[in-house]
Structures are given as C-alpha cells and as structure tokens.
Amino acid sequence: MNKSILGSLGRNIQKMRMAKGLSLSQLALDAGLAKSNLSRIEQGEGNPTIETIWRLAVQLDVPFGDLVASLESTLGENGVQVRLIDQGEDDPRVDVYWMSCAPHTIKQSEPHIAGTTETITLISGELLAGESNDLRQLEIGKAHTFAADVEHSYQTGDSWATLMMVITYSKPHDVKQDVLL
C-alpha cells in the first residue's frame, strides 16, 4: 500500500478506536498486536496484512469495509487480492467485495463479528470455500452462503479464482459515521 492509503487506513482505525473509548494498548492487546505495531499502523507507517485489518475490525466490532472504505486500491498478500466494491447502509448491513486468489492458494480466515455471513459467487476458476469444517466446491455462477463468525477458508485449484463476496452483518453498526476519506 502506498503512503496515502496507509495514512487513510491508520486514521480510520484511530478514529474508530477512540470512538469506542479504547486505548492503543487495549486494542493492540485484544487484536494480538504489539502496541508499537498498532501505533505505526495508526500513524500510516506500518504495513498491515489483510488478516491484521480483519482482526482490528473484529476487535473494534465494525465491518471490515468501514476500515478500508476510503482506500481506492486493491489490498493484497500471499496470492489473495481484495477490493471493497460497495457498502450498504441499511439493516442488515451488507458489504460487497471482489476477490481474486492465485492458483494453489489456501486462505484461512479468522471469525468475523458475531452473526456475520458470507455469500460467495464464483466468477472464474476453481474454489473450495466455506466454514473450515464444511468446505464446498463452488460452481461458476452459483452462490454459497456460510457462517463467517467461525473460522472459514478458501482454497483454489490449478488456476486463478475470481469471486464476488457479499458479507452480511446481523446487527446494526453505527460507527461508520465520518469515515475519513
């Protein structure tokens, strides 16, 4: 990520942390990060992984999209690229992402906020996806919905897989106010 994207992400995290009344130390501890690393991220100097951003979103009890809403680029690491396409503002809250995974990628995802579901529609390639103990082979153009508040994963075959991911949050979230752009 470039410096301006990191700066926007850092400001979003800091604003939401402060809105929740959490200290830097407490959020770092809850998210399993060193305080110095979280401080660097908030200052726009760190280089957080997608998983780190997800852990921070879970600890802040906000949708992932609220942290990355102002980022106008694709986030990527370890053969996985993710881009926020749109965010809903109704109840339930729905966010839509484009995701691409390199061949032979296994992406383990930690549980999201309680009550969250994901609906995956495969656009191209081969993909196993779902709750870690119940992976399903997806067919192109078919949707698969599963609980995302438990460990879940994505596994590609011999080719790139491209998919649309719709994340639905079961409870209202009001922290989206004034996400920094």
Image (cartoon, rainbow, N blue to C red):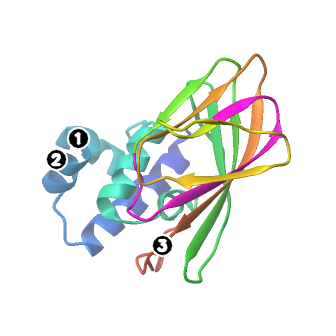
Q: Is residue 68 visible?
A: yes
Residue shown at the point (48%, 72%) measured from the top left: 170
Residue shown at the point (35%, 45%) measured from the top left: 41
In the current view of this chain or complex, which residue is farthest to the front? 134
Q: Are marks 2 and 3 in contact (CB under 8 Å)?
A: no
Indicate whether 5 appears above or below 109: below
Position of the N terminus, as image quadrant, is top right
Q: Position of residue 138 (x, y in %)?
A: 74, 39
Secondary structure of residue under mark 3: loop
Query: Looking at this view, is 63 or 39 the one in front?
Result: 63
Residue bearing mark 1: 32
**Residue 139 included in the magenta stretch of the image:** no
Indicate whether 156 appears above or below 173: above
- What are the residue bounds of the magenta stretch? 111-128
Residue bearing mark 3: 170
Q: Position of residue 4 (x, y in %)?
A: 54, 49
Label 2 CA crowd tier, 10 Å (few <14, some 14–19, many 20+): some
Q: Are marks 1 and 2 in contact (CB under 8 Å)?
A: yes
Residue bearing mark 2: 29
Indicate whether 28 appears above or below 154: below
Residue 155, quarter of the rendered image:
top right
Position of the C terminus, as image quadrant, is bottom right
Indicate whether 132 appears above or below 69: above
Q: CA distance from mark 1 to mark 3?
A: 25 Å
